[in-house]
Amino acid sequence: MFDPKMSMLATALLAMLLLPGCNRADSAGPGGPEGPPAVAVAPVTQRSVQQAEDFSARLEAAETVALRSRVAGTLNQVHFKDGERVARGALLFSIDPRPYAAEVSRGEAQLAATRTQVDLAKAELARAEKLLPMQAVSQQEIDQLRASVKSGEANAQAAQAALNQAQLNLGYTRIVAPVAGRLSRANVTAGNLVGVGEPVLTTLVAADRIHAWFDASEATLLRLQAAQRAGAPGATVLMGLDDEDGLPHKGTIDFIDNRLDPATGSIRMRAAFANPTGRFVPGLSARLRLISGAPTLTATVPERAIATDQTRKTVLVVGANNIVAPREVKLGALLGGMRAVSGVKAGETIIVDGLQRAFPGAPVTPQLLKVDAEGMPIPPPPPAGGPGGGAPAGK
């Protein structure tokens, strides 16, 4: 049988038991009954770092030639295979030379005729000059003969120029490679009639060198100029392709444009690389790292210790009394898992693990980690009885 008095007594006893536990939970601080939260910390290290920036680049040939015919005629033969690598001066196309060889022969005959006329005019002038003291010829005849000699010499020069042009045209029937490199496909096959300048027979790109073009910031330009004024070694550029690990290729900056783009605040730069094996093909994308200036001692912190606060980058510094304080930093080069920064000093203690448990102005329980030679924190060994150790749990 239900007793209302007994029910009220049981409810009162239950309330008395719950009140002390609630009061203890409410009286605990931010770290809970066990104190401030535990976080892993490590000291800020210092190492010699060179200024470096990473860019995306596009490869272009150092030299590109669109081969065209300089004379009109029938294409006799194509002397290469599509995509072939050729040396400078290699014969690529030949045009029917017979019309131009005939022009050369005609020019040679014309030159011989004019020279004969000059020789005759000179002989007549010499005979007339001998008769002039005897007044056998007039001065007017002497002047006419001298003019005839000069006219003949001018005609000989014109004939020589025509012959030179005919010889040039005959030479143009052999189209050779102006630079060493790799050819595209032949756009015209043997038997077709080609004109002067049209069509493009093929294209040739230099293979021994390649250019990597990229856009650098105003700050990069100013830093390069400051390094040059200080007499520092020239900037070095490292390059890697998409299928390569790291940046195995080394080159140099060989061109900086003469003005910045006001719309983007960037300036066009070019790096040159040797291409002895032809691995670098124009049009490929590449990763570049520009290294400039002399090495300087710079503070480094683990990359994972850096937090983002809107547009700022910060680290959490553990100061006096283990109080957490955020510190804004400016990022430098990425060195493996470490990041060069400015804004903290070597020896200061920062939080590297447990960032989510730390709050600015609140205390923490720091657990100092050892670091390796590069300054990277070494994870602590697993505790005894952890995963894979200790006695099995009872049922």
Image (cartoon, rainbow, N blue to C red):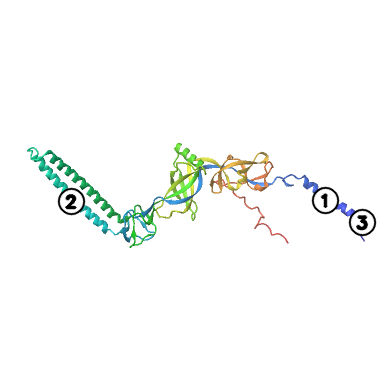
Which residue does the image show at 87% across and 53% down from the upper left? 11
Query: Residue 42: in sight, yes or no?
Result: no
What is the quadrant of residue 87 in the picture? bottom left
Q: Which residue is tagged 2? A: 113
Q: Which mark is residue 40?
A: none
Relative horizontal placement of residue 119, taking residue 330 as reference (left or right): left
- Residue at (84% x, 51% y) in the render: 17
The mark closer to the camera, 1 or 3, is 3
* Residue marked by disc 1: 18
Q: What percent of the width, then of the height, locates residue 297?
A: 53, 40
Residue at the spot x=20%, y=53% of the render? 109
Which residue type does callout 3 highlight?
Answer: Pro
Q: CA distance from mark 1 to mark 3?
A: 22 Å
The residue under label 1 is which amino acid type?
Answer: Leu
Q: On the picture, is 305 further left or further right than 48?
A: right
Q: Is 249 positioned to the left or the right of 29 in the image?
A: left
